[in-house]
């Protein structure tokens, strides 16, 4: 998961990667990531709007979101 310029992390188990662009990448801006993480935006909505860019067969994080649900 890339959220430039704030950070990058491996979200789910998979092959270790250390250099270059890995084969499974998800990228978005900070506002969209917070909306996804809190459930204010669904994975499908983020992808459909173009706010979430995901490539590779392991780049679908829909089953792992939201991370935290706001009340």
Image (cartoon, rainbow, N blue to C red):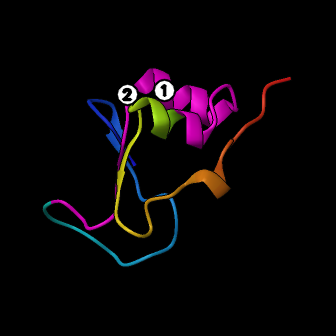
Give the secondary structure at mark 1.
helix
Look at mark 2 in the image and give the residue it sits on.
29
Give the percent coordinates (x, y) of residue 68: 73, 37
Tell me if 22 is positioned left or right of 53 in this view.
left
Q: Which part of the image, by quadrant, shows the C terminus?
A: top right
- Magenta stretch encompasses residue 22: yes
Q: Which residues are magenta?
A: 21-45
Which numbered tag is attached to residue 19?
Answer: none
- Per the model, the C-alpha gap separating discs 2 and 1 is 6 Å
Mark 2 Cα-neighbour bin, 10 Å: few <14, some 14–19, many ≥20: some
Tell me if 48 is positioned left or right of 36 in this view.
left
Give the secondary structure at mark 2.
loop
**Could you tell me which residue is drawn at 67 percent across and 25 percent down?**
40
Q: Is residue 24 above or below residue 48?
A: below
Tell me if 22 is positioned left or right of 41 in this view.
left
Given residues 67 and 62, the one toward you in this image is 62
Look at mark 1 in the image and give the residue it sits on.
32
Give the percent coordinates (x, y) of residue 47: 47, 40
Residue furthest out toward the left: 20
Give the percent coordinates (x, y) of residue 6: 33, 31
**Could you tell me which residue is drawn at 70 percent across and 32 percent down?**
39
Q: Is residue 47 above or below residue 19?
A: above
**Could you tell me which residue is drawn at 27 percent across and 71 percent down?**
17
């Amino acid at each position: 998961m890339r959220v430039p310029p704030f950070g990058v992390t491996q979200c789910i188990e998979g092959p270790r990667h250390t250099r270059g662009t890995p084969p499974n990448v998800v990228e978005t801006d900070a506002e969209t990531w917070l909306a996804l993480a809190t459930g204010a935006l669904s994975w499908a909505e983020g992808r459909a709007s173009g706010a979430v860019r995901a490539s590779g067969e392991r780049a679908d994080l829909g089953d792992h979101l939201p991370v935290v649900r706001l009340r």
